[in-house]
């Protein structure tokens, strides 16, 4: 099975199914980078719902963004399902691809003629694996030479202005959400050095943070630019935390119900904070200590300094050459 990619003709089309979920979409990008490095001739299309398509916009590893309904019309030679679930399985089954790959534990497994084993087996490890490793292991199994798994990558023009910290005080459930009062205390401590900017979805209550700058319900493209220009990210384990890691923004991330070994910031300067009895047991002094450690390491500019966004700028520049055919 290691030569499966070699069976694709030059310029062959590879469809990657990753329909939704912000963090999962972001953590798919290292696998895309590895795949494109191994087969620079291939045309890689990402099948994604419109709401999340901006995650992949500007990415030079992606040739086309595909609405789910346009997958079969695109006629891929290989369809790799990284999503799981019944809808993605149906899309893979009806893709028309000669080669259909998915993890062996996906159901129904008969859809796939390339069944991918567990990441631990591919990577030859017995430990827990990070989600980025799990997703990258799929392309290793299909024939990409095993190598270091890179940082996730997003592309955006960083927002300018005075140095600021992006704070995301929300989570997908109460067990993943630290108290608003704790975030307010951290914002107050950051204020002399970095302007706190609180972010949240359109339906989330940002009123406790009204005395600070707020970005509520921002489109994903604008959120990318905002996070790309930040000097620091502070927040609960969430999709925006993975966005910050993808831009290389130093991050302090608070964990409750999820496992930081699987979902922690991937390859960015970071501190993970958890409590003995879940996220509600995290004490403000723990978070303050994490912020101070990042500052002491020189990774998080807690005081104004010349912008260090050149890497983020150069990653965003030149990505405009990628051609997109959304089909939405």
Image (spheres, grey):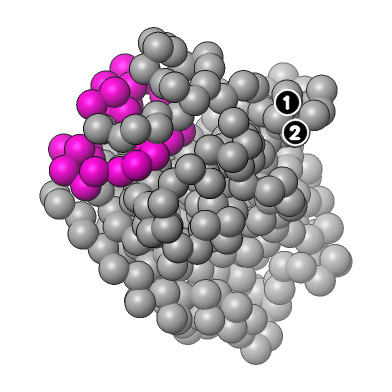
Left or right, 81 with reference to 307: left
| Mark identifier at residue 41 | none
Residue drawn at x 24%, y 43% is 75
Magenta highlight range? 67-94
Magenta-span inclusion, residue 58? no
Residue drawn at x 25%, y 32% is 96
Report the residue marked by disc 1: 120
Left or right, 128 with reference to 51: right
Rendered view: 124 above or below 185: above
Rendered view: 89 above or below 312: above
Q: Residues within 10 Å of mark 2 (few under 14, many from 20)?
A: some
Q: Residues within 10 Å of mark 1 (few under 14, many from 20)?
A: some
Report the residue marked by disc 2: 123
Percent x, y of residue 14: 39, 46
Percent x, y of residue 322: 35, 70
Residue drawn at x 34%, y 33% is 98
Left or right, 206 with reference to 245: left
Q: Nearer the viewer, residue 44 or 250?
A: 44
Left or right, 327 with reference to 6: left
Q: Quadrant of residue 59?
A: bottom left
Percent x, y of residue 11: 38, 59
Residue drawn at x 35%, y 50% is 13
Measure how far apart labels 2 and 1 are at the Cα level.
Answer: 5 Å
């Amino acid at each position: 099975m290691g030569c499966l990619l070699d069976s694709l003709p030059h310029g062959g089309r590879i469809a990657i199914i990753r329909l939704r979920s912000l963090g999962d979409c972001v953590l798919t990008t290292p696998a895309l980078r590895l795949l494109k490095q191994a087969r620079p001739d291939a045309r890689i299309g990402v099948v994604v719902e419109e709401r999340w398509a901006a995650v992949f916009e500007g990415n030079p590893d992606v040739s086309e963004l595909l609405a789910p309904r346009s997958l079969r019309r695109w006629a891929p030679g290989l369809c790799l399902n990284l999503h799981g679930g019944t809808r993605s399985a149906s899309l893979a089954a009806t893709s028309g691809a000669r080669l259909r790959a998915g993890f062996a534990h996906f159901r129904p497994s008969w859809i796939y003629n390339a069944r991918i084993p567990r990441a631990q087996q591919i990577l030859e490890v017995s430990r827990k694996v990070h989600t980025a490793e799990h997703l990258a292991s799929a392309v290793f199994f299909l024939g990409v030479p095993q190598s270091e798994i890179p940082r996730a990558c997003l592309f955006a023009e960083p927002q300018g202005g005075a140095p600021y910290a992006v704070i995301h005080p929300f989570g997908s459930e109460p067990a993943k959400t630290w108290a608003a009062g704790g975030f307010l205390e951290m914002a107050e401590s950051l204020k002399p050095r970095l302007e706190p900017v609180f972010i949240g979805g359109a339906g989330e209550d940002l009123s406790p943070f009204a005395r600070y700058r707020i970005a509520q319900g921002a489109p994903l493209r604008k959120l990318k630019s905002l996070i790309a220009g930040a000097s620091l990210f502070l927040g609960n384990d969430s999709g925006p935390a993975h966005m910050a890691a993808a831009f290389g923004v130093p991050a302090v991330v608070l964990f409750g119900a999820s496992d930081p070994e699987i979902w922690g910031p991937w390859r960015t300067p970071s501190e993970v904070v958890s409590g003995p009895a879940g996220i509600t047991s995290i004490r403000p002094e723990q978070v303050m200590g994490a912020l101070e450690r990042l500052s002491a390491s020189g990774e998080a500019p807690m005081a104004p300094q010349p912008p260090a966004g050149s890497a983020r700028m150069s990653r965003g520049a030149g990505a405009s050459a990628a051609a997109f055919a959304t089909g939405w």
